[in-house]
Image: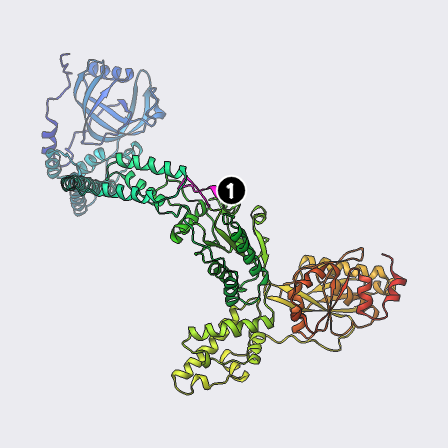
Amino acid sequence: MREEQSPFAEEMDTLAYVLRAQGVPEFPLVELEVISVLPLRNTVLFPGVILPISVARPSSIQLLEHLKAEKTPYLAITAQKDPERDEVLPENVYTVATLAKILRAQPTPEGHITLMIQGRHRIRLTEFVQTEPFLRARYLYAPESLPDETHQKGLLLALRENALKALEHLPESPQEARVLLQNIQGLPFMTNFLANNLPMSLAERQALLEIDDLGERAEKVLAQLQNQLNILEVTEDILNRVRSTLERQQRDYILRQQIKAIQDELGESPEQSDLTRYREAAKNKKWSAEAQQAFEREMARLERIPPFSPEYGVITAYIEWLVELPWATYTKDRFDLEKAKRILDEDHYGMQKVKRRVLEYLSVLKLRQDMKGPILCLQGPPGVGKTSLARSIARALGRKYIRMSLGGLHDEAEIRGHRRTYIGAMPGRILQLLRRAGTSNPVFVLDEIDKIGHDFRGDPAYALLEVLDPEQNSTFQDHYLEVPYDLSRVLFIATANTLETIHPALRDRMEVIELSGYSVPEKLQIARRYLLPRVAADHGLKANQFKVSDSLLLHVIERYTRESGVRQLQRELAGLARWLALQSVEKKKKAQDIILTEEEVEEILGVPRFEKEEYEKDLRPGVGIGLAWTPYGGDVLYVETIAMPGEGKLSLSGQLGEVMKESATLAYHLIRAYRLASPEWFKTHDIHIHIPAGAVPKDGPSAGVVLLAALASLVTGQPIRPYLAMTGEITLRGKILPVGGVKEKLLAALRAGLQIVALPEANRKDVSEIPSELLQGLSLVYFSDISSLLAFAMEGLEARLLEGAVV
């Protein structure tokens, strides 16, 4: 189509005009009463800027035809608030606009008109006088205030320098743009020119146009320019790094190809040597058919993949795990029962039940060598030697020993491993430790199994269900390996302080062997046989240089430790050994010439931390002695009661738990039911029950009988039999139920100098498992009902019980 020249078009070269510009030219003011308004969808026109636009809207084309008829090139250019709307109303356009002049108009084949317009002045549209078919409005000029000359020069210099820097970061910036920026001398045109060309939203451009202070507008444009410059610098830095990485990868690829060509000529290809090594290792493996198939499948993939492929390393890691695991590799068991028993006795004192169980397993294994390994759980308080006993079992059997700590374990993948789809995936710790041991029948210790955690990553206890099930662990599936692995010959030994926190299904799969705390005689033997030689060796002393008498050991055990195990005892003995080593080094005395006394022990270890438990004689009525179990062994509890005038209230103190409070309430109601005092006495007296050591929490039902006896003694005024302690749970029917921790409680009674202990009849079987030599000096009596117990505890009370009982 032939170019149509409008009658008001000016023939001019845009770039030449800009290069001649010394700021925004002093355009004459146009005096028009009403001006036609052309809304633009996505841009804002600034004064002095020349802008090409395409006019396609029918209303806008009618506007141009009107201007042509009126023979005027001037119109108002404003921005449309919502670019998506075709209908243009006064409320949909901004009122701060630019008076512009049409420099050139040219129709297009599509029926549109391309305009070249130049902004002249800022104006404000004050009143719209026409809305159809296009907008016409009255207007006022909106002059701009200029900063002082010095401020103008500074802003102009900053804008030019930052704009030139931004052009340096653009890959294909035209040379004309650089010349253009260097030749603009006025701050107004530089500001408007950059505001028109910087990447900004329509709202940001309109906000700049509406600023009356040119200095403020220039500063905002400078901030936008600086932000854009920062973005360009970061983009260029990223592109340079990517380009450098790609060039390095290309160079490495070429070098690898050259090295491969040289090695092929010499017959020294490392890939071929790896493949050969894997196949040689696989020949000696006695693995399952599934493992053989997985090996052949991955080897075939490895032969097809180039060495520089990321998949190559993943496959080689998997194959190495396959060939390095001890498939069907077993150590030879030692079937010498005498030697096994001697080793167990050398390392640990007592623990006959555990030792007997190990010897039974060894005997059955000798008769049937394909026997599946048992799943043992050693449960007991800290420091009694559970983990070290497992090590001794491995030594006695002649097997490798591996230990996996489960305390705080949260992720199921620690047991089963990660699938190979994850970056850096590995098998679980079960297979990792078996590879390290190099055998498939080690003694595998699962330490602290009661302290497994669980969170959003899964519950490791559920993963252990398969590991510790003899019916399933012969085909254990690791997520990484994805091939069944036989764990049935592994002797798993779990250790735990308590069974309450172990998942019931997991607890059901294990054979639990309880290890109770050591008695004082047992601690004395352990210290003499094991701890003293070990501590002396650890501190550079010979056996004859570390002399501690039995009485002194007993003093340290009773006055400086209060535990079920012997860890604290070992630490205290280590303190004595350090003191002896210091004396020997300072040459004050030879270590073997020093005979430690209690006074020296107190000087070395400090003031005794615990008072020796002793029976208090001549207890008044209302005081009874109970026995308690703690994680550190047994303890003696004194139950104190007192009556005072009141309204029949019952008060409890001593930081008692809910169960013990219920036992106290139950004992109080039983005493009232037995009518050991008149009903009026209970209505006019308050009773207070207190158990000393108020800072120590206490709970459990086993104090029921002593609470009952103490209340009976208080109400009748008759003291409880001397040197008597008791334990047992009571019921409203007057029955005495069994309790736990019998061994620890009896040992606590012995330490306190008590002579008689009343126990529930149902606990007689528990006493039979305690070595009789530990209970020397202690008389045990058994009761199944509270009537006979109270009659024994307080002589002469039996008749009153028979007379008053209403239960």
Residue wearing tag 1: 472
Q: Is residue 477 magenta?
A: yes
- Front residue of 144/774: it is 774
Q: Residue at x 9, y 30 (%)?
A: 16
Residue 24 lies, in percent from the top left, at 16, 34
Is residue 690 rendered to the left or right of residue 75?
A: right
Residue 727: give x, y in percent of width and height.
Answer: 72, 64
Q: Quadrant of the C terminus?
A: bottom right
Between 300 and 685, the one nearer to me in the picture: 300
Q: Amino acid at mark 1?
A: Gln
Q: Please state the horizontal and vertical placement of residue 792, each as a whole percent of the image.
A: 81, 68
* Residue 186 sits in quarter: top left
Query: Can see residue 139?
Result: yes
Which element type, helix, strand or loop, lies under badge 1? loop
| Residue 328 percent location from the top left of the image | 42, 46
Please tell me how many numbered marks the rendered image carries. 1
Looking at the image, which is closer to me, 91 or 461? Answer: 461
Residue 553 among those drawn in magenta: no
Q: Which residues are magenta?
A: 472-486
* Image quadrant where one finds the N terminus: top left
